[in-house]
Image (tube, rainbow, N blue to C red):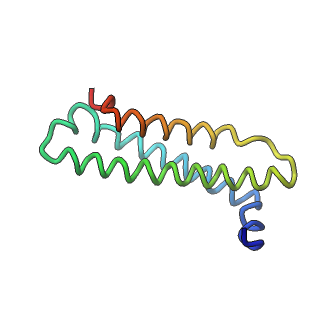
Amino acid sequence: MNPELKKFLQKPATGSVLTVASGISFFFTCMCLPLVGRAGSSVPYAEQNKLAFLGVLGLTFTLAALATWSKMARRSGDKSPLPYWSLGLCAVCAALFVLLMAGLLAV
């Protein structure tokens, strides 16, 4: 890994900004959830709704994964606490993805 990038990722502010951004993005994901729910999956443009939701979910997962990566990189240097919130958000995004692909969100 590039030493400058590693130094940037190990800054406490970087992990905090990414964590807050992933949290805000998760709230936006929750607001977009009706796109793939019962009402959004029964319209002629349901595939576009699904793609839009996948894009928002992908952004949320990417931000949460970057926040986790940043905090884990910092943790390797100063033994800071494990980023439970970021790891949990990654797990929730993965679970939403599995549920979406299985068709269980459109019940």
Q: Locate the C terminus and report the quarter of the image it occupies.
A: top left
Q: Which residue is nearer to you in this view: 50 or 11?
A: 50
Q: Residue 90: x and y, percent?
A: 56, 42
Residue at the location (49% across, 50% down)?
A: 60
Residue at the location (62% across, 50% down)?
A: 19
Q: Is residue 97 positioned above or below 25 on the image?
A: above
Q: Quadrant of residue 33?
A: top left
Instruction: Using residue 39 as the reference point, say whether residue 28 is left or right of it.
Output: right
Q: Is residue 98 positioned above or below 72 on the image?
A: above
Q: Residue 12: x and y, percent?
A: 76, 57
Q: Residue furthest top?
A: 107
Q: Residue 71: x and y, percent?
A: 72, 51
Q: Residue 43: x and y, percent?
A: 14, 41
Q: Which residue is nearer to you in this view: 2 or 81?
A: 2
Q: Locate the N terminus and report the quarter of the image it occupies.
A: bottom right
Residue at the location (37% across, 48% down)?
A: 54
Q: Is residue 53 positioned above or below 10 on the image?
A: above
